[in-house]
Amino acid sequence: MNTKIQVTVWNEFRHEKSNPKVASIYPEGMHTTIANFLGKETDYELRTATLDEPEHGLGGEVLSHTDVLIWWGHMAHGEVSDAIVEKVKTRVLEGMGLIVLHSGHYAKIFKALLGTTCSLKWRESTDKERLWNTMPSHPILQGIGDYFEIPQEEMYGEPFGIPQPDEQLLISWFTGGEVFRSGATWTRGHGKIFYFRPGHETYPTYHQAEVQKIITNAVRWARPSVCIPDNCPNSPALEALPEDPEADNRPTIGHK
């Protein structure tokens, strides 16, 4: 029996092919960089998937064999198949963990699960990002100090169109003065969701130790505790019921 945490890292893999600066930072794609540092964990088993693969690399039994899915998207949110989004959503509701990175805030799957716009303010300039640790006892933030800094990052600013998080883990401050809820968790169905803000494609953010540590911790936190497929059964009574003169006319098959 395989007891390792099955992790799938999903990435559009478009910027790396079209932008030389991004390609120089992530020559094999951001998904490969993330999978490589996660692969150092002896209890993780990694696979990657990208947008332009058949079924976006998430067909067949990939999702059913995934404990935690990591999602990075930006320029091609609209190209993600609605059918695949529905499959991912179903798996999260069953118990699969989902980690959404940076511009994945606008991904179809994130908006579908949160039910809000997920809109925000943004700016590409010369901002430094300082991330404050607001829950130092949380498993995702183990090994992280009071704060850490990313020398240059895209700015995201409030208001952030998300529902109230179950847990607010990180708050970012940027050189331009904005703040942002940059690390937050939710539960949807039986699945755990973590949104982590840093990761603009033109900066080497996923090479930074603190960022790697948080994503590594988040995988372990998000792993499923159960897998409960959705159903809506007709249920027999546990105790004897009074005689039902309409029994033969009552439905026993639902509409799900």
Image: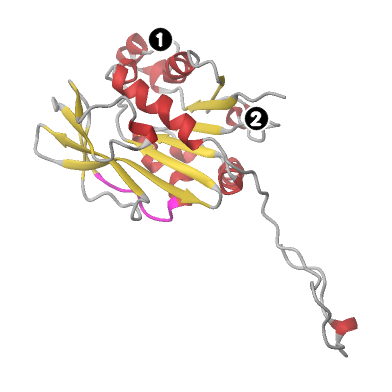
Q: CA distance from mark 1 to mark 2?
A: 25 Å
Range shown magenta: 114-120
Q: Check disc 1 and give the amino acid type.
A: Pro
Q: Residues within 10 Å of mark 1 (few under 14, many from 20)?
A: some
Q: Main secondary structure of the magenta part?
A: loop
Residue placed most toward the observer, 243 or 66 = 243
Q: Position of residue 210 (x, y in %)?
A: 29, 22
Secondary structure of the residue carrying tag 1 is loop
Residue 120 in sight: yes
Residue type pointed to by label 2: Val
Q: Which image quarter is the C terminus in?
A: bottom right
The colour scheme of the drawn protein is: secondary structure
The residue under the point 41% across, 39% down is 194
Question: Where is residue 178 drawn, in percent x and y?
Answer: 13, 41
Residue 147 disc label = none
- Relative horizontal placement of residue 148, taking residue 23 as reference (left or right): left
Is residue 137 toward the left or the right of residue 247 in the image? Answer: left
Task: Please state the horizontal and vertical placement of residue 61, each as a whole percent of the image.
Answer: 70, 31
Decide which of 214, 158 is in the foreground and name it: 214
Seen at 78% across and 68% down, the residue is 235
Residue 72 in view, yes or no: no
* 239 relative to 152 in the view: left or right: right
Looking at the image, is 197 positioned above or below residue 14? Answer: below
Identity of the residue drawn at 64% across and 44% down: 227
x and y, in percent, of residue 22 in the image = 33, 16
**Which of pointers 1 and 2 lies earlier in the amino acid sequence?**
1
Q: Which residue is mark 2?
A: 62
Please name the residue that numbered disc 1 is placed on: 27
Give 222 or 10, whichever is nearer the viewer: 222
Q: Which label sits in the foreground, 1 or 2?
A: 2
Whether residue 44 is in magenta: the answer is no
Mark 2: secondary structure: loop
